[in-house]
Each structure stands twice: as C-alpha cells, then as structure tokens.
Image: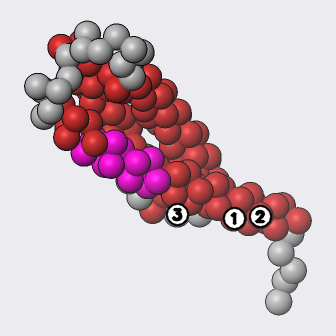
Amino acid sequence: MSQPTSESANDTERLKALEKRIKQLGDKASQLLLFLSFALVVAALLETQGDRLGPCQTAFITTAMRFWVGAIFPILVSILPLKEIRENCTPWYNFVRWSKFGLLWAAIFSVFIGALFFLLGVWRLGLGKW
C-alpha cells in the first residue's frame, strides 16, 4: 500500500474545508429564508390593515415586501445542491462557494434595504397617519 502524497493530502484537506464552508453558507441561506418567510407574513398582515396605516406607511411596507421578495430568488439559487454536479473537484467547489457567497450577500443587501423601508413604514415618528 502506498502512502498518500502530501499533495493529495492537501487536496483532501482543501476539499473538506470547502465542503464545510459550502455547508455553512447553505445553512445561512436557510436561516435567511426562514426570516424572510416570517417577515413577509408580518408585512402582509400590516398591509391589510389599510384603515390603520396612512398611504405613506402602506407604500413603505409594500416597498419592503418587494425587496424581500427580490431576496428570495438569490437565496433559492444558493440552496441548490450544486456541489453534487462535480463531486470532489476543488475548482468546482471553489466556484460553488464563491457563488453562494455572492448570492447571499446580494440577498442580505436586499433584506437590509427592505428592513429599512419596513421600519419607515411602522415608525410613526410622532406624526400620526402620514
């Protein structure tokens, strides 16, 4: 039996590190999707209270929902099991990791902007109905 070379040992370690990071990014995407599901339900419930909210507040909440819905698509793409397309391939795993990273940041940016609009919609700032 031959001993594995240091190069193949390094590749194995690199693959395991990439697999671990891809799993972490997938877990974060799942958590973000869970947050979005609750956020969209709350926003939809608030939006149906049209007589209690002013038109500006309703517009802010609607805009927040649009940003949050826009964040769903990058998250769904980042949850796809792309790692299985080319198993044990370091360049592919590296591509998958960077893709998930970029998609998650795009979704996080959209969620953040939506959260700002949501806050504008629920804060009355002492002005009553806008």
Q: Residue at x 38, y 53 (%)?
A: 34
Look at the image and tell me in which quarter the C terminus lies: top left
User: Which of the two discs, 1 and 3, sits closer to the camera?
Assistant: 1
- Is residue 73 among the parts visible in the rendering? no
Q: Amino acid at mark 3?
A: Glu
Of residue 48 and residue 64, the one placed in the foreground of this image is 48
**Which colour style is shown?**
secondary structure
Magenta highlight on residue 13? no
Measuring from the top left, give residue 50's x and y in whole percent: 12, 26
In the image, the segment drawn in magenta is 30-41
Tell whether label 1 touches label 2 (CB within 8 Å): yes
Q: What residue is disc 2 on?
A: 13
Measuring from the top left, give residue 13's x and y in whole percent: 77, 64
Tell whether label 3 touches label 2 (CB within 8 Å): no
Measuring from the top left, give residue 84's x and y in whole percent: 45, 62
Q: Residue at x 82, y 61 (%)?
A: 10
Q: Which mark is residue 16?
A: 1
Magenta highlight on residue 34? yes
Q: What residue is disc 3 on?
A: 87
* Dot 2: element: helix
For the residues labelled 2 and 3, the Cα–Cα distance comes to: 15 Å
User: Which of the two discs, 2 and 3, sits closer to the camera?
Assistant: 2
* Dot 3: element: loop
